[in-house]
Image (tube, rainbow, N blue to C red):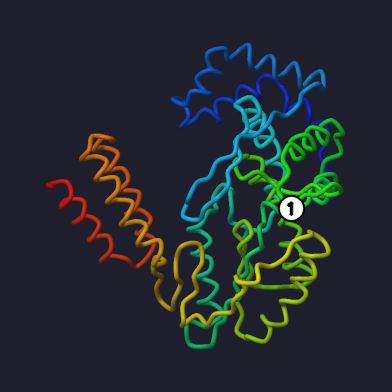
Amino acid sequence: MKTFTNLYEEITSVRNLFLAWKEFRRGKTKKKDVMRFEYRLEQNIFELHRDLRDKSYSHGPYKGFYITDPKRRHIHKAVVRDRVLHHAIYIKLYMLFDPTFISTSFSCRTGKGTHRGVVWLENATRKVSKNYTQPCFVLKCDIQKFFDSVDHTVLIAILRRKIKDTDTLRLLGEVIDSFASGQSNLFVRKGLPIGNLTSQLFANVYMNEFDQFMKHPMSVKHYARYTDDFVVVADNKQYLVDLLKPISDFLDNELKLSLHPNKVAIRTLHSGVDYLGYVVLPHYKRLRTKTRRRVYRGLTKKMRECQNDEIANGNIKQSLNSYLGTLSHANEYRVSEDLKNLYCFLLKN
């Protein structure tokens, strides 16, 4: 197994910290905390570098708040100094770990994403059903409270197998242990903060253990995952039923995770497979009903804000184009036309 050494100096170099700042500030230049950090940018970066060089760095506290996207999520936001370091870590670790992931891991990876995941499901169901002429079943599962349940000891042990640099492991431990969810207790620390960039990478590193289990010992041919949401496509329903026990056992024994009891389902292709915001059916796919309603509500809300001079008209056009882009990945011509008509109607009124 290939391992990585001497990472610490690369992660903590002044050059990498400035590169991390450049990546971090994108789209955040008007945030007050970002502006304050930028006002004394060189001093702040060199202070961070010095603390890392002297091994005196300590991760700060988090500020918690809720967002709805559409699920209600508890976000934990670190201070700018820590978030810049998260980017510095991500820059170096992503290029090392990404080649070790399977091709059908679609979350938070360059060249992947939700649309690629849905296209993969379309292709897999077409292949398994022999161009929609044979039975096709899809097992769809979700991990219960995934980000809150990631076990720190297990995650660090996984990282240790690839990284032999003790200073890097100590730094990663500092970042990982800077947060603990309600699943933690006196003996076990659990949880990754959804607001951290590093959490996206750590989630893939953690779940890659499961991916490898599915692709190798289990030899599952048509398997894909997006964060903690995964699917298996097969022409035999009983095969999928029989997979559930080894899946559940591996998650419990190796990763200290469990399947969400209300989010395990086996669907036929002809009844539609709801995955990553789309419903895949033979020959076509539709936008999920809830997503479609959210698009209508979102455009209407932004138009009202524009009429009240709360946002500029250009922002509305940008939002409309974004919605139309989402719809372009599905068979939703009528919905696209309805949105254009709604935009014109609200613009006139």
**283 in relation to 178, above or below:** below
- In this view, the residue in front, 199 or 8, is 199
**103 in relation to 43, above or below:** below
Q: Residue furthest left?
A: 348
Residue 210 locus on image (x, y percent)? 74, 62
User: Exactly how many numbered labels are in the figure?
Assistant: 1
**144 in relation to 323, above or below:** below
In the image, what residue occupies the spot 53% across and 69% down?
121
Please give left or right for residue 175 compared with residue 293 in the image. right
Q: Circle 1 sits in a helix, a strand or a loop, which is it?
A: loop
- In this view, the residue in front, 286 or 182, is 182
**272 in relation to 181, above or below:** below
Residue 206 locus on image (x, y percent)? 73, 53
| Residue neighbourhood size for the residue with mark 1, other residues' Cα within 10 Å, grouped as few (<14), some (14–19), many (≥20) | some
In the image, what residue occupies the spot 73% across and 68% down?
214
Residue 173 locus on image (x, y percent)? 80, 37
Please give left or right for residue 175 compared with residue 5 in the image. left
Residue 260 locus on image (x, y percent)? 65, 67
Q: Residue 176 lies in what quarter of the image? A: top right
In the image, what residue occupies the spot 53% across and 45% down?
66
Q: Amino acid at mark 1?
A: Gln
- In this view, the residue in front, 31 or 50, is 31
Q: Which residue is mark 1?
A: 183
